[in-house]
């Protein structure tokens, strides 16, 4: 404990502001003074402060435009808090990456590191990916807290609030992405990925709840967050099915509840649906082939059945399209998309679960290896001690033999 404290203290001592960070702090202090200085402060004092800030700006160079825009949202914060945030966003931000709820640096991770990283996600697809990854990161934090035995109600509530925010933002971004006909399949795949992650983490956390050594309080918090994950999974799945329903259709259709009916299906719209079905199935099969060796035989069997059904359904849809049965063919193609993404979710959720559990096993194996090494060192020390003791005993025996030889020689000389 003392070593960790000293290490953290050394890290804190090494923190310093760069010139850019100093300029940034000055800008935000200036904003704070202009907007929150009490009216009772003499105008001459306020004017003097502003003049000094302006002189500093002239000496220190231009503002950081992107970062300044981000920190403008903190203009109503006390200057001390702003200064603290900026200071911590330097060297400490790297240390904060692995922090967990309850740690001193966790606010830096979620309120500084992550938002600043978000400034550089420009495309709609990147924004969707980012929110999905942040949601998965919150779930990983749950598992680390549980492993450390410190998962309590306060930490669960904080993670739940952030998780809900990430999932809501993900859904909004995924919907916008799906409105682009060229990006609709990507939106569907990303949504299936998040759905799979929610299922996987439910599975992993569910196994922890039935462990004998899991405390009652931890088990209660796990049950609560698993319930949230189950609801979120349903919401994400419903959202994905809406996206899947419109894949290959004209993106000008603004009605989310609109479906391709028998009366409106045309050859042109059918070709779009067929292309979407083929692409989604091909993408799902590629994802399956990548992780197939690491899946259990049960999951492989189930996935193979689903993808075989999707492949045969695609052939049926093409046959109906050739006969001019466009509406029936469209329904078949939609069924292909549904089957392919359901297969994708099953495959990915199992793969993610195994990776999470594999990571835990690796951690346990590392600890076991370290314990064995320590035991080996103890045994080695004990062996060395025994060898030294044996050598000492041998030396004593040798001394005794020498004494006996000397006594025998003396007696022999006496008789002579």
Image: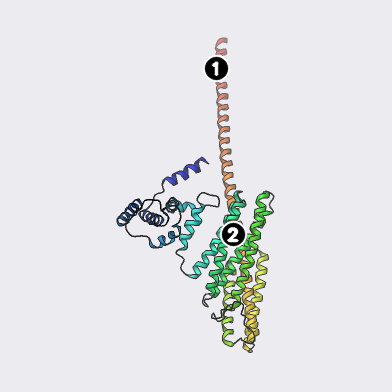
Is 35 in front, or is 58?
35
Percent coordinates x, y for residue 293 in the rendering: 61, 65
- Quarter where residue 258 is shown: bottom right
Color style of the picture: rainbow
- Report which residue position mark 2 lands on: 355
Q: CA distance from mark 2 to mark 1?
A: 75 Å
Helix, strand or loop at disc 2? helix
| The disc label shown at residue 81, or none | none
Query: Few, some or many C-alpha atoms within 10 Å of disc 2 (few <14, some 14-19, many ≥20)?
Result: some
Q: Is residue 264 left or right of residue 35?
A: right
- The structure residue drawn at horizontal position 56% and vertical position 36%, both measured from the top left corner, is 381
- Residue pointed to by mark 1: 406
191 or 301: nearer the viewer:
191
2 or 1: mark nearer the eye: 2
Dot 2 or dot 1: first in sequence order is: 2
Position in image of residue 375 (x %, y %): 59, 41
Q: Position of residue 289 (x, y in %)?
A: 59, 69
Instruction: Check the image and name the residue furthest to the bottom.
Output: 324
Residue 397 placement: quadrant: top right
Task: Tell me which residue sits at (35%, 50%) in the image.
Answer: 45
Looking at the image, can residue 319 be seen? no
């Amino acid at each position: 404990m003392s070593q960790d404290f000293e290490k953290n203290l050394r890290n804190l001592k090494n923190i310093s502001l760069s010139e850019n960070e100093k300029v940034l702090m000055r800008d935000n202090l200036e904003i704070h003074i202009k907007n929150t200085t009490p009216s009772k402060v003499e105008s001459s004092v306020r004017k003097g402060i502003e003049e000094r800030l302006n002189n500093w700006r002239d000496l220190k160079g231009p503002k950081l435009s992107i970062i300044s825009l981000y920190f403008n949202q903190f203009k109503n914060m006390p200057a001390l808090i702003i200064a603290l945030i900026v200071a911590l966003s330097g060297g400490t931000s790297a240390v904060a990456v692995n922090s967990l709820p309850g740690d001193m640096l966790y606010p830096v991770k979620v309120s500084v590191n992550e938002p600043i990283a978000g400034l550089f996600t420009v495309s709609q697809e990147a924004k969707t990916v980012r929110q999905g990854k942040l949601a998965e990161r919150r779930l990983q934090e749950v598992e680390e807290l549980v492993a450390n035995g410190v998962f309590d109600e306060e930490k669960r509530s904080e993670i739940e609030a952030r998780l809900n925010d990430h999932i809501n933002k993900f859904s909004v971004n995924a919907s916008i992405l799906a409105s682009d006909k060229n990006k609709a399949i990507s939106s569907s795949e990303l949504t299936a990925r998040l759905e799979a992650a929610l299922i996987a983490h439910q599975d992993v956390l569910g196994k922890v709840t039935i462990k004998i050594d899991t405390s009652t309080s931890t088990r209660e918090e796990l049950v609560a967050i698993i319930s949230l994950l189950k609801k979120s999974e349903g919401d994400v799945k419903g959202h994905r099915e809406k996206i899947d329903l419109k894949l290959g259709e004209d993106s000008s259709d603004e009605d989310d509840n609109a479906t391709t009916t028998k009366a409106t299906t045309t050859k042109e719209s059918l070709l779009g649906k067929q292309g979407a079905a083929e692409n989604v199935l091909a993408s799902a099969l590629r994802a399956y082939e990548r992780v197939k060796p690491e899946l259990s035989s049960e999951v492989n069997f189930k996935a193979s059945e689903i993808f075989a059904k999707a492949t045969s359904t695609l052939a049926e849809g093409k046959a109906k399209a050739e006969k001019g049965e466009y509406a029936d063919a469209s329904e078949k193609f939609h069924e292909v998309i549904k089957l392919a993404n359901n297969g994708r979710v099953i495959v990915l959720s199992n793969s993610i679960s195994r990776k999470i559990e594999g990571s835990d096993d690796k951690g346990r194996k590392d600890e076991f290896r370290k314990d064995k090494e320590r035991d080996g060192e103890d045994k080695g020390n004990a062996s060395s001690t025994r060898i030294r003791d044996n050598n000492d005993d041998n030396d004593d025996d040798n001394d005794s033999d020498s004494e006996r030889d000397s006594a025998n020689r003396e007696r022999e000389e006496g008789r002579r």
